[in-house]
Image: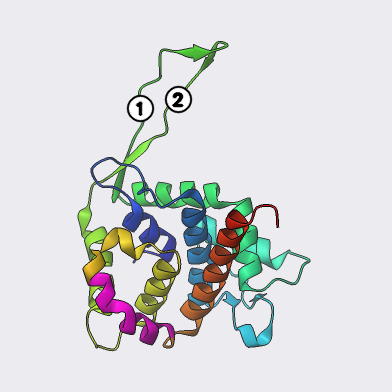
């Protein structure tokens, strides 16, 4: 079974170009760090209940996944009192590149993706070689199609969804990624369903709310840079 960070990266990968969709660096970082916290919560490693205040570690047993375990230890050893929003902002500044690389490496190791490194450029700047970033192509499309199918079934039906699917939809919606996956006409039909889904799952709702607040703050800062 894929974990949330793996599902997020698969959804954002352009199958033809082997690069990520142009969702923006901040969006990718928030989606990745939010997905790690969400996975730790579903694994019963952390408690994200807003009514209890800060995020707390309830089980320090390793999950076996490097990015999850490093984040778990980071939270466990932190001396600050941080809620979900604080941790998403902190992790998106500290470790998104590491989470991304470890997650992609896992997907390559499982035979789902293939890493293709571009040739070394012949040009150099002050005798320093320049490398292009590697590209990632889907080898086994079954996993990605399964994730997209689950999203479709949750959004466009009235069936009672699995809690993990609800949380994933909330995360993807909060990061405004759904518009890259579905047509605008389709998304208009999902508005009532999204409102319903946000009320179904506490974890997804908290991550959704935290990311929405962060995105709003970023937007306000860009609109009023001197304020």
Residue 191 belongs to magenta span: yes
Instruction: Answer left or right for 165 relative to 59.
Output: left
Residue furthest top as drawn: 127
Under circle 1, the secondary element is loop
* Sequence-first disc among 1 and 2: 1
Please say which color scheme the image uses: rainbow
Q: In the rendered image of this protein, does residue 138 appear above or below residue 124?
A: below
| Within-10-Å neighbours for mark 1: few <14, some 14–19, many 20+ | few
Q: Cβ–Cβ below 8 Å for labels 1 and 2?
A: yes
Q: Magenta-highlighted stretch: main secondary structure?
A: helix
Residue 118 got which mark? 1
Horizontal side, residue 182 vs residue 169: left or right? left
Q: Residue 78's spot in the image, x, y percent? A: 74, 64
Give above or below for 190 relative to 211: below
Q: Residue at x 63, y 57 (%)?
A: 224
Nearest to the observer: residue 88 or residue 73 = 88
Question: For the N terminus, which image quadrant?
Answer: bottom left
Left or right, 134 with respect to 66, comes to left
Instruction: Decide: is 136 above or below 206.
Output: above
Q: Which residues are magenta?
A: 186-198
Say which of 190 and 205 sits in front.
190
Mark 2: which secondary structure? loop
Percent from the top left, x then y, of residue 47? Answer: 60, 79
- In magenta stretch: residue 18: no
Residue with the most extreme right position:
79
Residue drawn at 31 percent across, 58 percent down: 180
Residue at 32% from the left image edge and 84% from the top image edge: 192
**Between marks 1 and 2, how big is the CA–CA gap?**
7 Å
Q: Position of residue 113 (x, y in %)?
A: 30, 47
Residue topped by disc 2: 131
């Amino acid at each position: 079974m894929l974990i949330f960070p793996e599902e997020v990266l698969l959804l954002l990968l352009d199958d033809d170009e082997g690069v990520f969709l142009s969702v923006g660096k901040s969006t990718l970082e928030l989606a990745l760090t939010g997905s790690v916290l969400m996975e730790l919560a579903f694994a019963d490693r952390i408690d994200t209940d807003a009514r209890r205040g800060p995020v707390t570690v309830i089980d320090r047993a390793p999950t076996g996944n490097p990015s999850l375990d490093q984040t778990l230890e980071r939270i466990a050893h932190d001396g600050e009192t941080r809620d979900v929003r604080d941790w998403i902002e902190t992790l998106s500044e500290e470790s998104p590149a590491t989470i991304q690389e470890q997650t992609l490496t896992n997907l390559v190791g499982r035979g789902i993706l293939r890493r293709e490194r571009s040739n070394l450029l012949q040009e150099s700047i002050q005798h320093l070689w320049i490398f292009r970033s590697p590209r990632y192509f889907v080898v086994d499309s079954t996993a990605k199609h399964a994730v997209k199918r689950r999203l479709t079934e949750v959004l466009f039906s009235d069936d009672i969804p699995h809690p993990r699917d609800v949380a994933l939809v909330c995360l993807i919606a909060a990061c405004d990624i759904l518009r890259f996956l579905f047509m605008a006409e389709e998304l208009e039909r999902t508005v009532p369903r999204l409102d319903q889904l946000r009320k179904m799952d506490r974890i997804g709702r908290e991550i959704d709310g935290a990311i929405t607040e962060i995105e709003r703050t970023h937007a306000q800062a860009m609109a009023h840079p001197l304020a």
